[in-house]
Image (tube, helix red, strand yellow):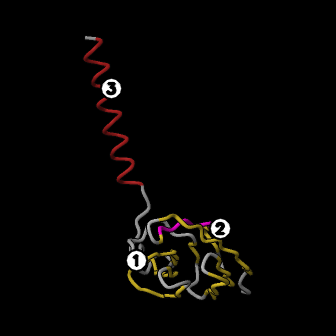
Amino acid sequence: MKKLKAISLIVLGGLVTYFAINHFTPQVTLDKKVLDVPVSESVSVVGYRNNVGGATIPFRYHFYVRANESPLTTPFLISGTPDVDITARDSHSLMIKMAGEIYQFTNVVWVKDKQALEPIHIQIDAQSKAE
């Protein structure tokens, strides 16, 4: 009887965890490309609009470092504006200037370029947007 209770609780816990992960993870609906800036011959920065809420939630913009047309993984920048100025300082360094809200930012991104992992260092100059 105790084993049956323990197994039932484990199964119930697994189902609750599975439901929570699948139901409460944020949805990403990338519907429009807003930026495509080459950094080197094989690496570029691409930006997409995330239109998850339609007319009820403001757009957020996801920016990715992409090597050799690889699939998008995790954005290095999520912002409230598509208006970012990206300058490649060299093949492993970017400078970003923008005005607006930043929701998430990562300053080093690793990309697989020519069978090796290469770091891309990102500097950002962000100003709050005047209301």
Q: Going from the N terminus, do you reach mark 3 or mark 1 first?
A: 3
Which percent across, then down, holds residue 76? 56, 69
- Given the image, on which type of amino acid does mark 2 rest? Asn
Q: Main secondary structure of the magenta part?
A: strand
Q: Horizontally, is 76 left or right of 8 in the view?
A: right
Identify the residue at horizontal 42%, vertical 57% (top origin): 25
Residue topped by disc 2: 107
Identify the residue at horizontal 41%, vertical 54% (top origin): 24
Q: Nearer the viewer, residue 55 or 47?
A: 47
Q: Residue furthest top?
A: 1
**CA gap, disc 1 and disc 2:** 22 Å
Which percent across, then down, holds residue 101? 65, 76
Identify the residue at horizontal 25%, vertical 17% (top origin): 4
Category of crowding for the residue at label 2, using alpha-carbon neighbours closer than 10 angstroms: few (below 14), some (14–19), many (at least 20)? few
Residue topped by disc 1: 30
- Given the image, on which type of amino acid does mark 1 rest? Leu
Mark toward the viewer: 1 or 2: 2
Kindly indicate the quadrant of the structure image that contains residue 8: top left
**CA gap, disc 3 and disc 1:** 38 Å
Question: Are the residues flagged by discs 3 and 2 in contact, CB closer than 8 Å?
Answer: no
